[in-house]
Amino acid sequence: MTLSTTDDAKSARWSLPENWPAMSRSKVRELLTAPGQPFEMETVSIDGRPTRVWKNAPPTLRAIAQAARAHGDALCTIYEDERVSYESWYRAMAALAHHLRECGVGRGDRVALAMRNLPEWPVAFFAIASIGAICEPVNAWWTSEEMAFGLSDSGARALVCDAERWDRIAPIRAQTPDLETCIVSRAAGPLEGAERLEDLLGSSDAWAGLPDRELPDADIAPEDDATIFYTSGTTGAPKGSLGSHRSVCTNVLSSKYNLAFAPLRRGEMPPEPERKTVLLVIPLFHVTACSAAMVGYFVSGHTMVFMHHWNAEEAMGIIEREGVHLTGGVPTIAWQLLDHPARKDYDLSSLELVTYGGAPAAPELVRRIREEFGCEPGSGWGMTETMATVTGHVAEDYLNRPDSCGPAVAVADLKIMSVDGERELPVGEVGELYAYGPMVAKGYWNRPDATAESFIDGWMRTGDLARLDEEGFCYIVDRAKDMLIRGGENIYSSEVENVLYEHPAVTDAAVIGLPHQQLGEEPAAVVHLSKGQSASEEELQQWVGQRLAHFKVPVRVVFTDEMLPRNANGKILKKDLRGLFQVAGE
């Protein structure tokens, strides 16, 4: 079997190890999914359609919550000086589940969860899901009006939030007529119209002393509604993506499946499972953190370290102090750790994996993670509507194809369709990416029109422009709405961005279209440079021109002192960048 290193891998100065791969991807898949193996598959009917699923995946979030108690005294969460064991988490979670049931919350009721990453977050999440209610993780970055939209759109009957979110929600309570019960954590004093979580459970250091109780009775099936995650809403109002217990729980084995691939590709056996410590810095209200990360960590008994807010040097101190094995989330986090001037002052040797999703990563970043951290890089692709993981990419496969987001996991299918959706395109051609599998959401909450447009016979129409290679590796080339057309020529912004990232001075980059009377639009770039580095507009234009066709060279390059603005999912807010060119042109 012959594998060639991609052009981007070459530009990132990485070469294939000798005698790699020891095993083809098809052979690895065959071994991992064989009858009797942990990743064995079976076919079930979901909404009347035959669908491959992980035979051994947990059936429901309630089942995960009940099984996670077995981790006992192992640390579940660390937040500043608060350290909560799995047994303490379980007792708090069961107590809150009983309280919600006593408040009249039952099967199918929506319960909003609005707070930063705190030990209370997984307590509330599993308490809600374990009684058959639907958990609505609210974007903690939202304004009062945005929160009013989310709560009223879902028809949330109850709310669990922190004091900071309550300060935004209390003034708009009248706009949420369905909201009956509000529970607030970390409030300084008495509340009007809400109860304090601490009055129900005590502070986190007291959870171990709560009564030993079983969860309230609940009959929950894998296809039952479990979550409503709202899309990022970069254009138009956010839409609530309705996930089932199966779609969330599928990620538990999908993530493990991706990690099991790398050792077998080297000719090694996957290591025995062991507990890890994870620095989880992306918000839990995002599917990547909740579904692809946290839910699986509860199965494995990993320890999750939360931060009040992201700070690269503080994170390095945590990695050293807690012996963190895994971190990441979005590429920006990895860049800031790599480029921080104080990195040499911290021992980061415990890191085994730096992984991310939600935004494309430069090929240079993949190489630097391996060379400078001495650990494996990992990535993948998914979206809110696929409950996160659809593809996965780690270690040598990722280094060999750093411009790919990896192949689909075994229970998922991908296809490339013409933009009009009429025909499937052959290998290598760029079109719209469609995804199918048990992780795909059930549709949009209360939006039959949008559901019909995006969910087609079980396939999710993603809005991403992509191509598949002969081995099934997926390459996201752009969002359909971000592709530029200059005088009839297609320009994929991610292609130009990747070339800019290869420049040694560039840490962050985005390409957008500027209107042009004759050509329609032209490419322009916004760039953030590494600390202590310099580059001019002309230098970067020449850099791109030496590597890409002339019509892809940005006609303007604007520099910014800060990293580019992103939403909570890590996606660059390109609509916020256009004003930079107006200012620069004045």
Image (cartoon, grey):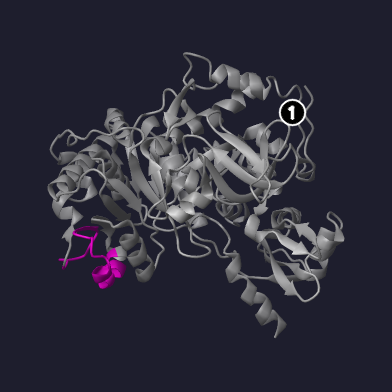
Q: Nearer the viewer, residue 151 or 256?
A: 151
Left/right of residue 556 with respect to residue 191 in the rendered view: right
Pointer 1 residue: 17
Q: Is residue 512 above or below residue 34?
A: below
Q: Secondary structure at mark 1?
A: loop
| Image quarter of residue 64 | top left
Position of residue 321 measured from the top left corner of the image (x, y, whole percent): 44, 44
- Count neighbours of disc 1 (C-alpha within 10 A) and say few if under 14, some if 14 to 19, many if 20 or more: few
Q: Is residue 123 visible?
A: yes
Q: Which residue appears at 83% of the width and 55% of the height? A: 548
Specify whether residue 186 is painted magenta. yes
Q: Which residue appears at 26% of the width and 39% of the height? A: 130
Left/right of residue 266 with respect to residue 441 in the rendered view: right
| Image quarter of residue 496 | bottom right
Position of residue 256 measured from the top left corner of the image (x, y, whole percent): 49, 30
Furthest-front residue in view? 422
Q: Is residue 285 visible?
A: no
Position of residue 2 measured from the top left corner of the image (x, y, whole percent): 79, 25
Q: Nearer the viewer, residue 404 or 387?
A: 387
| Magenta span of residues | 166-192
Total labels drawn: 1
Q: Amino acid at mark 1?
A: Pro
> Which quadrant would the C terminus be assigned to in this image?
bottom right
Position of residue 460 measured from the top left corner of the image (x, y, whole percent): 53, 44
| Image quarter of residue 148 | bottom left
